[in-house]
Amino acid sequence: MYQQQSLQNFLERLASGDPTPGGGSAAAVMGAMGAALVSMVANLTIGKPRYREVEDDMRRLLTRANALRTQLSDAMEADVDAFDRVMAAYRLPKADPGRSEAIQTALKQATEVPLQCARLCVAVIELCREAADKGNRNVLSDVGVGVLAAHAALKSCAINVTVNLNAIRDPGFIAAKRAELEDLLAGRDEEVANLYDQVLARL
């Protein structure tokens, strides 16, 4: 499993001439790092007398952030698997009557992976807002890093969704996925910029 490999090993694989892991896996890692930083902020808030009033909120935040980190770590492998299915479909003989349908099916599956990753990244961004509002002020800078990582991951997922949609021939599928992606992206640039400015102002 990629999440069990050392960071150095993952980076070496990422830098190699192999197509996987690639940008989709990198996006998932960025999102997972954002979630991990939220968990760290929660852990460094829980048990502190100064933050006793928000301890229950921080415990809930920690549970959610840990779950998102796990899901995003799993998305690393899911991206590799989806790409492999697309490549397998393209390798079918051109004379195979089922080749075109296999390619389209694989591309649709490959679209769902970064779209799900994008959903998870939006959830991480939302957790960063709560962490900034209620978390330990001494680690506020880590909230800033976390939200930037999650935002970069979200925008990266959007690239991967778009590149797959551009090769799909189902207008209904394309319209539905583009609409969802637009909803996920709507207002996020401003939201993250505002949170970033808030963090800088409070350091």
Image (tube, rainbow, N blue to C red):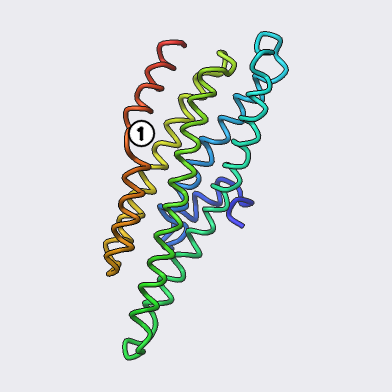
The type of residue carrying mark 1 is: Arg
Is 189 rendered above or below residue 50? below
Is 41 rendered above or below residue 49? below
Residue pointed to by mark 1: 188
- In the rendered structure, the answer to whether residue 27 lies left or right of residue 179 reads right
Q: Determine the residue positioned at 30% across, 60% down.
A: 174
Please identify the quadrant where the N terminus is shown.
Answer: bottom right
Residue 13, horizontal then vertical, whole percent: 49, 56
Q: Determine the residue positioned at 56% across, 30% down.
A: 37
Residue 116, horizontal then vertical, whole percent: 47, 51
Residue 125, horizontal then vertical, whole percent: 46, 33
- SS of the residue under disc 1: helix
Residue 20, picture quadrant: bottom left
Question: Alpha-carbon neighbours of circle 1 within 10 Å: few (<14), some, or many (≥20)?
Answer: some
Residue 46, horizontal then vertical, whole percent: 69, 20
Is 70 rendered above or below residue 145? below
Residue 193, picture quadrant: top left
Residue 42, picture quadrant: top right
Is 107 rendered above or below residue 183? below
Q: Nearer the viewer, residue 116 or 24?
A: 116
Q: Determine the residue positioned at 46% across, 64% down.
A: 82
